């Protein structure tokens, strides 16, 4: 089974820590199958699944502050992380609310999070 797998939860293997979404390397076929059966990982079907490109947009500093303030007023940290994840924003699960708001804005997804609230 040469097909790569992606972690669905934190996986520790051979001194490496793979976070959810990371491609897990260096596993035997039996180790891959075990993780798949445990639903700790999933098969990666295509090259585009392996390579995730985050495109960021340049935002005017005044507009950035305005958008950040709107997000801050509409979401607490947990709600923001859930909504951002559902909108396809890429960020680290340990990121602060400020970092997640920055990712939402720079990845051009702010409209998806504010359209229902406004």
Image: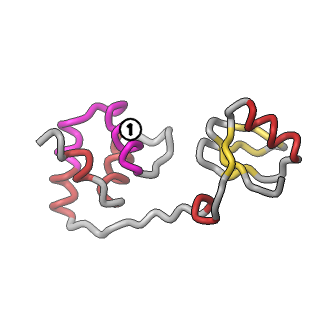
Mostly what secondary structure, the magenta segment?
helix
Task: In the rendered view, tell whether residue 46 sits above or below residue 99.
Answer: below
110 or 35, which lies in front?
Answer: 35
Label 1 Cα crowd, 10 Å radius (few <14 / some 14-19 / many 20+): many
Residue 22: x %, y % from top left: 64, 50
- 95 left or right, relative to 117: right
Question: Badge 1 is on which residue?
Answer: 81
- Residue at 83 percent across and 53 percent down: it is 1
Q: Picture quarter containing residue 105?
A: bottom left
Residue 106: x %, y % from top left: 33, 60
How many circles with numbers are drawn on the protein?
Answer: 1
- 33 left or right, relative to 112: right
- Residue at 87 percent across and 46 percent down: it is 29
- The residue sitting at the left extreme is 118
97 or 28, which lies in front?
Answer: 28
- Residue at 32 percent across and 32 percent down: it is 79
Give the quadrant of the C terminus: top left
Residue 108: x %, y % from top left: 30, 60
- Residue 61 is inside the magenta segment: no
- Indicate the secondary structure of the residue bearing disc 1: helix
Residue 71: x %, y % from top left: 22, 43
- 86 left or right, relative to 118: right
| Magenta residues (range) | 68-88
């Amino acid at each position: 089974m040469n097909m790569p797998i992606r972690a669905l939860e934190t996986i520790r293997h051979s001194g490496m820590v793979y976070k959810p979404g990371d491609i897990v390397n260096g596993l035997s076929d039996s180790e891959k199958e075990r993780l798949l059966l445990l639903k700790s990982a999933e098969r990666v079907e295509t090259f585009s699944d392996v390579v995730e490109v985050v495109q960021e947009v340049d935002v005017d500093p005044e507009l950035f502050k305005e958008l950040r303030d709107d997000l801050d007023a509409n979401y607490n940290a947990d709600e923001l992380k859930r909504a951002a994840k559902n909108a396809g924003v890429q960020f680290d699960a340990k990121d602060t609310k400020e970092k997640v708001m920055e990712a939402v804005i720079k990845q051009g997804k702010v409209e998806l999070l504010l359209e229902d609230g406004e």
